[in-house]
Image (tube, helix red, strand yellow):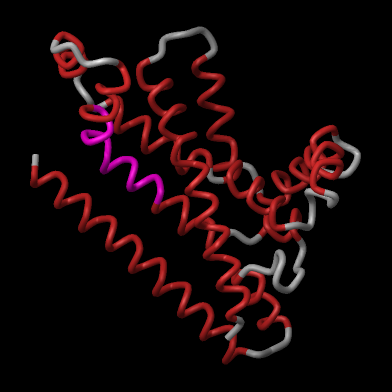
């Protein structure tokens, strides 16, 4: 069992959902109620990671974050190391890859909130921030929770993009998915089976817990 790879994967998942929580709420809310030209184009761009092969997406991320790119040079000048083949690069890649898993469920959750409810809250004297905190977020909570669970579990199992952007550096970019692949390549079926089973259990428990919490939230309404 490669515990270092497991800890790194859990840390990567935690950082990913921590960043995607505010990003998903802002983007999901904007797309749910915004009416503007090019909305279909924006939604299509956000959904691209769902259909692009991991190698294609990983290649473009390498170009976008590499040492010859403006972002890569800026990151290296600021932090003294490259963005590619680092944990920071993995987090950036994971956030981009998981955007549709975070934004789409939140968008659908905000779309399900009746306009009359928001207007009634505004008529009661609530500010926009109060409406968001007291009305919108509680009603959209099941969708937000679903988005976070999908993003977290997808991060744990992501392989292609992680390998291309981060490589397989122990303790830095070697996630549990890559560790499983390495053990299979080394014909160590026992270790690969243990890690695969653990990843299956973690994913199952996480998704099951989200269903329980979501159903409880719906029953309370």
Q: Main secondary structure of the magenta part?
A: helix
Tell me where residue 45 sits by quadrant: top right
Residue 137 among magenta residues: yes
Range covered by the magenta-colored residues: 136-148
Tell me where residue 21 sits by quadrant: top left
Image position of 155 (left or right of 217): right
Residue at far left of view: 220
Tell me where residue 210 sits by quadrant: bottom left
Instruction: Residue at 15%, 8% (x, y): give it.
Output: 123
Instruction: Residue at 42%, 51% (x, y): give it.
Output: 150
Residue 8 point in image, percent of width and height: 60, 67
Residue 76 point in image, percent of width and height: 84, 45
Quadrant of the snapshot with the C terminus: top left
Asked whether 175 or 37 is in front, the reply is 175
Q: Is residue 177 above or below residue 166?
A: below
Instruction: Residue at 22%, 25% (x, y): give it.
Output: 113
Image position of 145 (left or right of 183): left
Image position of 125 (left or right of 42): left
Q: Is residue 54 above or below residue 173?
A: above
Image position of 217 (left or right of 190): left
Residue 122 among magenta residues: no
Q: Is residue 114 above or below residue 108?
A: above
Residue 152 point in image, percent of width and height: 46, 55
Asked whether 7 or 163 is in front, the reply is 7
Instruction: Residue at 40%, 14% (x, y): give it.
Output: 34
Residue 52 point in image, percent of width and height: 63, 42
Quadrant of the snapshot with the N terminus: bottom right
- Picture mark count: 0
């Amino acid at each position: 069992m490669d515990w270092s790879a497991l800890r790194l994967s859990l840390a990567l998942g935690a950082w990913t959902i921590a960043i995607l929580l505010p990003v998903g709420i802002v983007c999901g809310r904007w797309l749910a109620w915004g009416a503007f030209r090019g909305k279909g184009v924006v939604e299509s761009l956000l959904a691209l990671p769902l259909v692009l092969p991991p190698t294609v997406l990983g290649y473009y991320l390498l170009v976008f974050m590499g040492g010859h790119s403006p972002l890569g040079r800026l990151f290296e000048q600021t932090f003294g190391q490259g963005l590619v083949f680092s944990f920071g690069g993995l987090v950036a890649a994971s956030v981009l890859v998981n955007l549709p898993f975070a934004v789409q469920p939140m968008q659908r959750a905000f779309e399900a909130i009746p306009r009359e409810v928001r207007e009634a809250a505004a008529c009661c004297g609530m500010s926009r921030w109060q409406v968001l905190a007291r009305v919108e977020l509680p009603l959209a909570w099941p969708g937000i929770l679903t988005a976070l669970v999908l993003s977290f579990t997808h991060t744990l199992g992501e392989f292609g993009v992680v390998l291309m952007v981060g490589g397989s550096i122990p303790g830095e970019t070697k996630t549990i998915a890559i560790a499983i692949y390495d053990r299979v390549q080394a014909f160590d079926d026992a270790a690969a089976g243990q890690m695969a089973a653990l990843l299956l259990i973690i994913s199952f428990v996480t998704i099951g817990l989200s269903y329980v919490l979501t159903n409880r939230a719906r029953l309370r309404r």
